[in-house]
Image (spheres, rainbow, N blue to C red):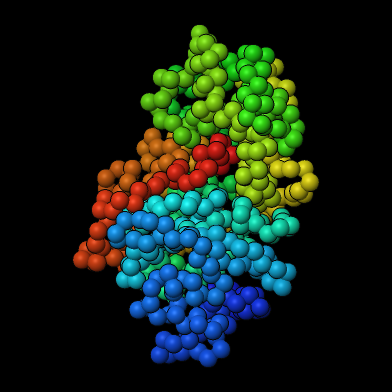
Amino acid sequence: MSTKLRRLLVSVLLIPVFGLGLAAPALAAPPAPDGRAAAGSFAAGSSVADNASADIKDRLAALPGMTVTEEKATDADHRYFLLTYTQPIDHFRPWLGTFQQRLSVLHRGYDRPTVFYTNGYTLGTNPSRTEPTRLTDGNQVSIEYRYFTPSRPEPADWTKAGIEQAANDSHRIVTALKRIYHESWLSTGASKGGMSSTYFRRFFPDDVDGTVAYVAPNDVDNREDSAYTDFFKNVGTPECRAALNAAQRELLVRRDRLEARYVADNAAAGSTFATTGSADRAYEAGVLDVIWAFWQYSTAADCASVPTATSTDDQLYAWFDVQSGITGNSDQSLAKYTAYYYQAGTELGSPSFDVSALKGLLHYDYKELYSPRTYVPKNIPMRFDPAAMRDIDRWVKHSAERIIFVYGQNDPWGAEPFRLGRGSEDSYVYTVPGGNHGSNIGKLPAAESAAATAKVLEWAGLADPAKARSLAGSHTIPPFGPLDEEGLKLEHNRL
């Protein structure tokens, strides 16, 4: 079956999903040939959305289902809006109700490409630009992943928190905003957001012209995790690996003293541990995090700061706080990431690795403690679907077009990366030498960075240098990399 035919069949199959009382824009009927909305297609007054001479704020507000909640100050070349959009709880049974999904729009100009940032977590609410947005000097649309608060229906039916539902969220928002932004579209995301941008393309391959997915793991077989053990046996230098292993052991050897501080500090912060089960379990889970967290966020140069057996309790405890976060496994911290852990335990998969070096020091069964189930309240049922990631992996290898994957050599999440296959077209995988979870195109070797940048510009319709105006450093809006969105560093080694 040809690629175009497959896409056509998908489009036909999805037609009944929309337009059932949800006021989804541009889904009930297409615009008339003259560019005006066909009669009865849109809500009263919504033609403002199609009027290029209208103010961008008015055009956004005129989109059915879209509400502008705030405009924030930015530089002279941009305008920045926070919005909500009405989404069905279940795209395949839209009569079950709706919820409000948060998003933001960084407006640069109607003549610029648009970058769709699939944030895998909570929406950052201050204006900033992803790398593709900076490279293209484009507009940027950023969304909050469904079921991260406040983009969560109440009560929450957690069976609707999956990747296909989220891909449909993205599809409806992109479809709506294409009434305003007519130039090329790219999608991007980092870490879980990079995964989400790939999943979006799998279900709606033609919604955007290209994708840049940063540091996106691909856990195809959740039962087979030897790649992570192999990674930790080879990353960095033997001396650094030995130092990290020793520091991790020392956190358990001194457990009686350090855990007492851990309990006291969490009590002072008002932390509780009903989700993990106890402060003891939470402490042990945090210790299991430290080596992964080190390589995820640090570089080889930071090996010199790893505590030793002669380090004081204060030094070791402070290092533990930097790597795992003293309150990171409390109910209050974990509540922000329930949607992630639920997904990891039902579709995405989660890593495991050899901990035999800690034999005799652990209080709990490693496989049981170090699993998504530990971090999700017990009243939320979970059942793992092993077919979800296999489906994504097959699509990437057999049907993916115009995707760039960027990984860091020293990032543990790159141990199980996306790999291209014979059916992948105009797609590329790059690895930043010595890079961590903050790896991006700009950190690649010069020739690879130039090649990847050229592809981004080509997909954005800017292959002609005369069209690629402004680019990176010309605005006061700060750039951000994969680690700068709100709360992302609290992922630790669980993504």
Q: 33 above or below 238? A: below
- Vertical position of residue 460 compared to residue 477: above or below: below
Q: Does residue 46 appear in the picture of this structure?
A: yes
- Is residue 5 at least partly visible in the picture? no
Horizontally, is 350 left or right of 376 in the view?
left
User: What's the residue at 67%, 26% (across, down)?
Assistant: 267
The residue furthest left is 466
Q: Nearer the viewer, residue 367 or 52?
A: 52
Q: Position of residue 476 (x, y in %)?
A: 30, 51
Report the front residue among 108 and 298.
Answer: 108
Q: Quadrant of the C terminus?
A: top right
Pick the quarter of the image with the N terminus. Answer: bottom right
Say which quarter of the image contains residue 407. top left
- Residue at the top extreme of this rendering: 310
Task: Count up the numbered dots.
Answer: 0
Residue 195: image x %, image y %?
Answer: 53, 52
Quarter of the image where one finds residue 151: bottom right
Tell me if 313 is positioned left or right of 383 in this view.
left
What x and y, as percent, mark residue 327? 61, 31
Pick the front one: 273 or 163: 273
Residue at image point 62% right, 44% down: 336
Residue at image coords 49%, 29%: 294
Q: Residue at x 56, y 66 (%)?
A: 85
Q: Residue 391 sits in which quadrant?
A: bottom right
Query: x, y (%) of residue 204?
Result: 53, 68
Placement of 327 over or under 35, stated as above or below: above
